[in-house]
Image (cartoon, helix red, strand yellow):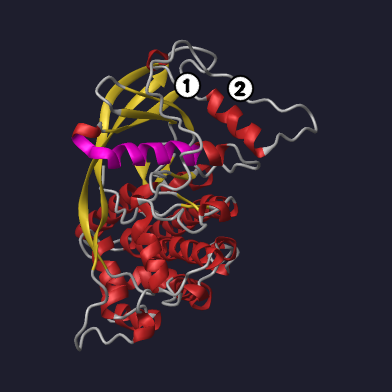
Amino acid sequence: MNPVAVHRVSFECVSRFSLIHRESVEGFSGRRIVNSRGRKWPPTRRLHAVTASLITSADSFEVGRLIGSYGFMNVTSYSGLQSGSEFDYTSDDIGRLKAQDIGEGGVKIRLYEGRISQGPFRGVPVIFKVYPGKRAGGTEADMMAANELNAHSFLQSQENLPSNLLMLVGGFETQFGEQWLAFRDGGKDSAADYARNASEKTSRARSQGAWNPYEKEQMIKRRRKFVIKILQGAMKGLAFMHENDRLHQSLGPSSIVLNTPAEREAMYLIPRLRDLAFSVDIRPSCLEEGATSGALSEQLWRRATASGAFTVFEKRAFGIADDIYEAGLLLAYLAFVPFCEAGVMDSLSLQRLLENTFRLDIEAVREYCLADERLEDAVKFLDLGDRAGWELLQAMLNADHRKRPMAEAVLSHRFLNGVVN
């Protein structure tokens, strides 16, 4: 399992309801949520219904094999922008570009296969996400687990829930203090896994000598459709979160799970967002003065202040724009890595190319890539629709957060709608 590149955390407004049970819970709590015809439940009642339906007994699950583990990345300090001839930033750039020192955090996550063993959902496959206890992960692990639980429960209580969010079905705490969150099995491959495998397939095909032009053309077409489908699903999930006043704050290729990694099965592909441990509640009541000082969201609001966002609505707008920036990096990653040979481009080198070398001048990035034949297929992909991909990338990675599009606008952009046949 690839590491999840996450570099900010949040824990806002979760004290109103705690879903992590510190005492043993007997029996099975797998009741369905049923609305009467024509009846709409109040948001609070819907939330209570969702939380009541979560399975909170360890006896209701069976745990299978370990399928992976990963660590989180977090901000270790806020160093400001680098100076020197290579980094000729103006004062207006402060806060607009990301300039954190990133280090690996102490929280290590384990993933297990499993299934529900009791009740009406018996036999349903699940994936367990295991947070270490305080002894191994400190208080941060508990905060992350609680935040992820609360974020999923809140979102699952909203109307018109899309299929592009991984579904939480329950959780429990062990005697050692580990928090086990159970999610409906939406697939074991992430977008990062897919991109890496696609890149390796490209390398193998080229290493075999002459590549049949027709076969290459068909493969490129399938790959383009698959990547667009991933981006569409990710943005639908993100748009739903923003519509309901939640930030993701850890969006990347490893935070998107795929129900199939096969490009020939693109029509059946359902990308789902996961890893909501760092989700931020941006409802006005949670952004009032004094409510944004939690340790897990400190870096987000520090950057917001550095960008001139002081009021509740300015901070909300900054947070949404910050998610869009990460979605822009996701677009760049999926436009390059699957279309290049293994080792030519990775997430870190791509981000450095965009941010440090060319300071988010996407036209300059394109000119640079045109000169490298190894990047030819990626350039052609972004060139579709009269350079529609580059246009969208420039908008999402705009150095001024105020000029970035909303998630709905990204979804309706022509690059994600019709340029790929």
Cα–Cα span, label 2 and label 1? 11 Å
> Percent position (x, y) of residue 345?
25, 64
Q: Which residue is mark 2?
A: 32
Q: Is residue 188 visible?
A: no
Of the residues shown, which amino acid type is indicated by label 2? Arg
In the image shown, does 218 or 168 lie closer to the viewer? 168
Quarter holding residue 156: top right
Q: In the drawing, does residue 15 fall left or right of residue 6?
A: right
In the image shown, does 318 or 271 lie closer to the viewer? 318
Range drawn in magenta: 136-152
Q: In the drawing, does residue 263 fall left or right of residue 415?
A: left
> Percent position (x, y) of residue 138?
23, 38
In the image shown, does 372 or 239 lie closer to the viewer? 239
Residue visible at 55% across and 24% down? 52
Q: Which residue is mark 1?
A: 55
Q: Secondary structure at mark 1?
A: loop
Picture quarter with the C terminus? bottom right
Quarter holding residue 352: bottom left
Of the residues shown, which amino acid type is indicated by label 1? Ile
Q: Is residue 387 magenta?
A: no
Residue visible at 52% across and 65% down? 317
Residue visible at 69% across and 37% down? 42
